[in-house]
Image: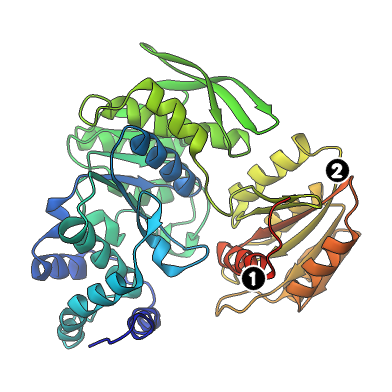
Amino acid sequence: MFQTYEEALKWIHGRLRLGIKPGLTRMNIMMEKLGYPEKNIKTIHIGGTNGKGSTVAYLRNILESAGLTVGTFTSPYIEQFNERISINGVPIADEEIRELANILYPIVMEMDKDELGGPTEFEIITAMSLYYFAFVQKPDVVLYEVGLGGRFDSTNIIRPLLSIITSIGLDHTAILGETYSEIAFEKAGIIKENTPVIAAVKQQEAEEVIVRRAKEENAPNYLLGKHFIVEDYHSNEDGESFTFKTAATKLNDLQIGMLGEHQAENASLAVMAAMLLKDSLKVSVADIKTGLLRARWAGRLEILSKDPYVLVDGAHNQEGVEALVDVLQTRYKDKKKSILFAALSDKKTDKMIEKLGQAATDITFTSFDFPRAAAGEALFRESSHPNKYFTEDWKRSITERLESLEKHEMLVITGSLYFLSNVLAFWKERNLGVK
């Protein structure tokens, strides 16, 4: 058994060697042995390609503003592992991680002997969170972010109050499928019988899959652009402003502090969810407005400094890069942009790099300490930008660029969320702060 947090974490991370093993059989076994914690929690399930974390942040803050205690299960983490299991934004304590690992350890060891094989890292973390929220801290409601896909994701063991599908993009195609329809089929797997589903998918073929699945499950569906809309959208100095509208409701001048039109869409999903839950969870319009304004999500179009101007964004797929470039070309059209980019080797980076090049004055490619990180030189070769560079030392690159940035210039650090996690830790370590 584990005597320290570090020992527990080493064991959990050691399960990464098992990779990804789709299916819910192992989760069902753990749930039975743990006393069915998934049946003892009120949950909301959030899936999709991009925007899951931001939507979680908006909805969490709305529900907290209503006086509720809100658990969240998210991935990946930005600064510390414990963030993945949080209550009201406060990560689980080290000692609680150790205790949960000790509860799971004998169960996992027994399962390892079975022909089916033992659970993966993500399955263990999911099971830990379910036990924690059901039997240890017992928040009023828990927001569960899907890890990968939906249908066979380990979080799909829950029976939520409602489900949210943020978007559909061509990401993780080797696992989820090559087309929008195939990926939508996997994401739509979180739709449950008689359980409302809210979606913001933009592709007609993806929407058809979700609507069909909802009909099969007798699940009321609410689609962005049809059942609720974002209008009167505009940017301001501190964020974005928009109006949320349904056939019966209109909420004017909603303010958010996260940047980009896509964030207004993510926020509208949270508003729609709050409207559906307003009676059962006692959520008011004032709670919605307060929560939206308070919400922040680390590493998503986050301003680290205004002098010099430094922006970080976890744009780790094509759709994420397109959203980032849109913000750079509208909100920051008068600034020269130096971009630092790192990615994972299993991502399709050619179109991402081409799109980033449209906004970049110069672009530097790098790598970082992670098993699946792409080589900076390989990314460099994919780029046709006239001012392209690569470096093995991204920390030195950031430090040197900060010293040379002028008022009309900005540094944009983007790519893999795992890279952003390293960058933000370095920023904190250097005590660079926000100016």
Which amino acid type is shown beneath numbered disc 2? Lys
- From the image, tell me which residue sits under label 1: 429
Residue 220 % position (x, y): 25, 28
Using residue 367 as the reference point, say whether residue 172 is left or right of it: left
In the rendered view, would you say 387 is above or below 104? Answer: above
Residue at 47 percent of width and 63 percent of height: 77
Residue 388 % position (x, y): 86, 64
- From the image, tell me which residue sits under label 2: 335
Can residue 203 be seen here? no
Residue at 8 percent of width and 64 percent of height: 35
Can residue 424 be seen here? yes
In the rendered view, would you say 412 is above or below 285? Answer: below
Using residue 52 as the reference point, say whether residue 44 is left or right of it: left
Residue 91 % position (x, y): 38, 60
Residue 100 % position (x, y): 24, 72
Using residue 274 as the reference point, say whether residue 113 is left or right of it: left
Instruction: Provide the secondary structure element on which disc 1 rests.
Output: helix
Residue at 45 percent of width and 29 percent of height: 290
- Quarter of the view holding residue 315: bottom right
Task: Kindly report the distance in space between the C-alpha atoms of the residues bearing marks 1 and 2.
Answer: 28 Å
Label 1 neighbourhood size at 10 Å, few (<14), some (14-19), many (20+)?
few
In the rendered view, would you say 54 is above or below 251? Answer: below
In the rendered view, would you say 185 is above or below 387? Answer: above
- Quarter of the view holding residue 208: top left
Which amino acid type is shown beneath numbered disc 1? Glu
